[in-house]
């Protein structure tokens, strides 16, 4: 089967990775979640894992379902964008690589804690403090199509954000403008 992807496919950084900080940076966090931002981050993470040969113990397939991984990878991506900005000091990429080594250690810790693996995923376990209701049982689910899961995750998150925003604006008093 042939694809229309260029030879390097999605593993080659393109101009979307080098966007200016004043434009969309590919940060895919609850406050900034959007299809374009998440798509940029997803492509960059895919490029990163292939370029550096990172195993699933550092970047697992369902990294997007774990906030601790999402925050770390978003920060690493933003740092990469800044380090490789044409206006940046020439030694900035060396700083990024030094910080990337630290980030890999943190990613390994969070992947181990989260329990996500190459072929299955589960929500990160939460420790219940005294007096809190017990957490519901955690079930592992097999990862059958990672790309499909990512797309559905983003669509669900964008819809939830839109629903929350709609509810907020619906609660505004039209006379006073207060919530």
Image: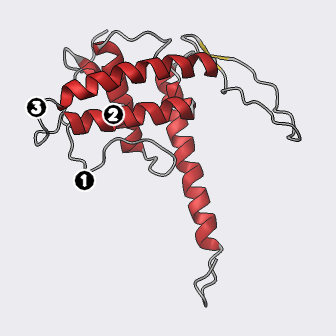
| Rendered image quadrant of residue 90 | top left
Which residue is tagged 1? 22
Q: Position of residue 62 (x, y in %)?
A: 53, 23
Relative height, residue 86 to residue 177 (above, below): above
Say which of 178 and 132 sits in front: 132
- Tag 1 near tag 2, CB within 8 Å: no
Which residue is tagged 2? 77
Upstream in sequence: badge 3 or badge 2: 2
Say which of 59 and 162 sits in front: 59
How many C-alpha atoms fall within 10 Å of the one at disc 2: few (<14), some, or many (≥20)?
many
**Residue 16, visible in the rendered structure:** no
Question: Is residue 170 left or right of 134 when viewed as pictured?
Answer: left
Upstream in sequence: badge 3 or badge 1: 1
Question: Is residue 41 left or right of 138 when viewed as pictured?
Answer: left
* Residue at horizontal 44 percent and vertical 50 percent from the top: 32
Secondary structure found at label 3 = loop
Distance in Å between CA atoms under marks 3 and 1: 21 Å
Distance in Å between CA atoms under marks 3 and 2: 18 Å
Which residue is tagged 3? 90
How many C-alpha atoms fall within 10 Å of the one at disc 3: few (<14), some, or many (≥20)?
few
Distance in Å between CA atoms under marks 1 and 2: 15 Å
**Residue 123, visible in the rendered structure:** yes
Relative height, residue 55 to residue 106 (above, below): above
| Rendered image quadrant of residue 2 | top left
Q: Position of residue 106 (x, y in %)?
A: 48, 22
* Residue at horizontal 46 percent and vertical 15 percent from the top: 58
Question: Is residue 32 left or right of 91 when viewed as pictured?
Answer: right
Secondary structure found at label 2 = helix
| Rendered image quadrant of residue 4 | top left
* Residue at horizontal 62 percent and vertical 78 percent from the top: 172
């Amino acid at each position: 089967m042939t694809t229309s992807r260029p030879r390097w496919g999605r593993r080659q950084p393109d101009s979307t990775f080098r966007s200016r900080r004043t434009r969309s940076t590919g940060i895919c966090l609850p406050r900034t979640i959007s299809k374009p931002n998440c798509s940029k981050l997803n492509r960059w993470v895919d490029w990163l894992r292939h370029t550096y040969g990172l195993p699933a113990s550092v970047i697992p397939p369902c990294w997007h379902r774990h906030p601790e991984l999402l925050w770390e990878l978003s920060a690493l991506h933003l740092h990469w964008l800044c380090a490789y900005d044409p206006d940046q000091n020439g030694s900035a990429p060396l700083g990024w690589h030094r910080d990337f080594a630290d980030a890999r250690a943190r990613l390994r810790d969070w992947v181990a804690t989260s329990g996500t693996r190459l072929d299955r995923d589960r929500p990160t376990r939460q420790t219940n403090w005294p007096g809190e209701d017990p957490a519901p049982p955690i079930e592992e689910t097999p990862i059958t199509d990672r790309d499909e899961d990512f797309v559905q995750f983003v669509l669900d998150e964008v819809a939830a954000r839109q629903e929350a925003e709609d509810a907020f604006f619906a609660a505004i008093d039209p006379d006073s403008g207060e919530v």
